[in-house]
Image (cartoon, rainbow, N blue to C red):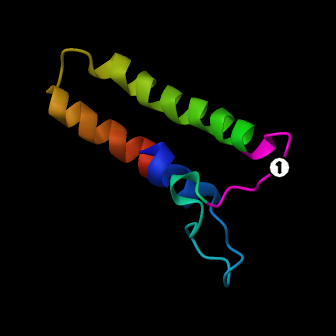
Amino acid sequence: AFYTVGYSFSFGDHSDGPVTFIGTGNFFLLDMADDDTGVAYSYWLFQFAFAATSATIVAGTLAERCQMNAYLFYSMALTGFV
């Protein structure tokens, strides 16, 4: 979920118009800045680590307390929109 919409909602491109609450570009990392050093992709990986960590912290508290489908839905919502 972070790859598809999470990064673009958080850090998406705002150059098309006024700054809004949510990002409007970089869905599926398609419009990432092309550079030889890979700074944009390393920044994505750094932010992905925080999104994954936030989902695993909740996994520890919910172990054996909820159904797997509920946990998967929560993890997708957390990494995609929070």
Q: Residue furthest toward the bottom? A: 17
Q: Residue at 19%, 35% (x, y): give it.
A: 70
Start-end of magenta stretch: 31-40
Main SS, magenta residues: loop
Q: Is residue 82 visible?
A: no
Above/below status of 66 relative to 16: above
Q: Residue at 27%, 22% (x, y): give it.
A: 62
How many neighbours does mark 1 have within 10 angstroms: few (below 14), some (14-19), or many (20 or more)?
Answer: few
Q: Is residue 9 left or right of residue 18?
A: left
Name the quarter where the N terminus is drawn: top left
Q: Quadrant of residue 26?
A: bottom right
Q: Is residue 41 left or right of residue 22?
A: right
Q: Nearer the viewer, residue 16 or 51?
A: 16
Question: Percent from the top left, x then y, of residue 67?
Answer: 14, 27
Above/below status of 69 relative to 11: above
Circle 1 sits in a helix, a strand or a loop, which is it? loop
Q: Quadrant of residue 58?
A: top left
Q: Amino acid at mark 1?
A: Asp
Q: Residue at 52%, 59% (x, y): give it.
A: 27
Q: Residue 27 in magenta? A: no
Location of mark 1 (residue): 35
Question: Percent from the top left, x then y, of residue 81?
Answer: 44, 52
Q: Quadrant of residue 34?
A: bottom right
Above/below status of 73 relative to 66: below
Question: Percent from the top left, x then y, of residue 29?
Answer: 58, 52
Q: Residue 36 in magenta? A: yes
Q: Is residue 15 visible?
A: yes
All told, the count of numbered labels is 1
Question: Percent from the top left, x then y, of residue 52?
Answer: 49, 30
